[in-house]
Structure formats: structure tokens, C-alpha cells
Image: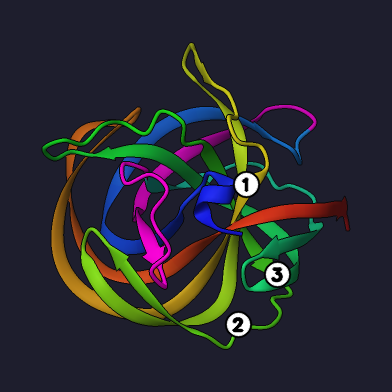
Amino acid sequence: MTAKELRLDYFQIYDVANREATGKVLLQGQFDERPLKMELALLDFFANPVAKNAEPIYDKNAHLTWYRGVQPPEPMRAVVLETQFGRFEIRTGRAYGLLVPTQKVKSGSVFPKTLDHYKVYRLVDVERVPDVTLKLRDQFGASEARMRLPLYFAVPVRKRHEIKEYPIQNERAHLLIFGITPRDLQKKVTLRNQFTKGTSLAIVRSLMLAVPSIKREWKHV
């Protein structure tokens, strides 16, 4: 189950010097009977597409900015996922934020027009950790990281912001987000997306790995 097969990259997720964010969006994914409002509060993390164990990156321009958001509570769901690391049974907790397609502004870069928005849920009743150490390489360099617990689950969502709507383009692919052994670094990036037109961010450390996943089944708990 490679990035190419799912048309969605692995992403290495970095902690940043947090910035306040504002924005109100309506989100609707495969869990939702109707759109739900989320209010963005903080620019929390930044994600690079990453080559895992020398597997090629699907789209070098696909970056994600992670905004922490506030919305009404949702029911807990039990979800069965299939990933390259095996099958996982998870339970989702409260919605935590929104992953927004983002251009990392530099020479030759373009905006990732085929990348979806993802609503991020915290996980409860977390289960096993894959017993693996990964070789990772992204635009910040190469490293090794050991997998830790799965922390979040991200589902593609249709998003409405002001008068513009962004449809789901790849409804099959989801992201299961694991903690990894952290790596400190100092980088600066300039971002462009619907909520920022040139924000400069200070990258602090790598914290997580988002793994492309297929949702096999789910139910309310």
C-alpha cells in the first residue's frame, strides 16, 4: 500500500513556533450526516511529504498545515483500518483540528491542487505500536525514527470557507498519525494557503508520521 497506489503521501509532521489563526469553516466527511462548523484557533504543525524506506514521494508539492480547531462534540466511532504496517482497530475521540493543503513557497513550487482537506480526530483506546524503525527523507533532510503510538486519525472532508467550497477528491485515502522519536532542527518556511498568503514559520522538531490508510469499516460506539 504505497503512496502512489493510494495517491497520497506519507507526511512527516513538525512542531512549529505556534501562531494564532482565525477562520470559520464548515466540514463534512464520511462520518457526518450534515456539515459541522469548526473555528480555527492556532496554527499548530506543518507537514512535509516524506519518502519512507526509500519509497518514492508521490507529490513533492503536497504539504499540509495543521490548524487546531474547536467544534461541537461528536459521537465516538470504532474504525477498522488497513495500512502498510497492518490492520488497526481504533476509536475516535473529539475532533482536534484541520489539515489544510499548503504550498511551501520556494523556487519551482506550486500549490497542491489535488490534495484534500482532512479533519483530525484524537484517538482513544489506543492499541499496539508497530515494532519498526524507519528511514525517512524529506525536504529537510534524512533521518531515522522509531514508531510510537497512533495518536490521531484524519479523514478527508468537504470544506466550505466563506463562499468557496472544496470537494473531496480522493475519498479512499485517510491518514493514521503516529508519534515518532523526535528530532530537533531549525528551519524556516514560508507558507501559502486559504488562511495565509506568506506566513513565515520556524520549524522546531519532527514529532509525528502520517501514514496513508484505507478505512475498511466503521460504526458508532
Instruction: Give how far across and how far down residue 76 sits, in percent.
Output: 79, 56
Other-residue count near label 1 (Cα within 10 Å), few / some / many at <14 / 14–19 / ≥20: many
Determine whether label 1 and label 3 are within 8 Å by CB: no
Name the residue furthest bottom. 131
Instruction: Give how far across and how far down residue 213 sits, in percent.
Output: 64, 57
Specify the segment rendered in magenta. 33-62
The image quarter in which residue 91 lies: bottom right
Q: In this orientation, which residue lies closer to the viewer: 159 or 134?
A: 134
Judged by depth in the image, the label closer to the viewer, 1 or 3, is 1
Determine whether label 2 and label 3 are within 8 Å by CB: no
**What mark, if any, has residue 173 been given in the picture?**
1
Instruction: Give how far across and how far down residue 24 sits, in percent.
Output: 48, 29
Residue matched to label 3: 124
Q: Is residue 59 magenta?
A: yes
Residue matched to label 2: 130
Q: What's under tag 1, amino acid-wise?
A: Ala
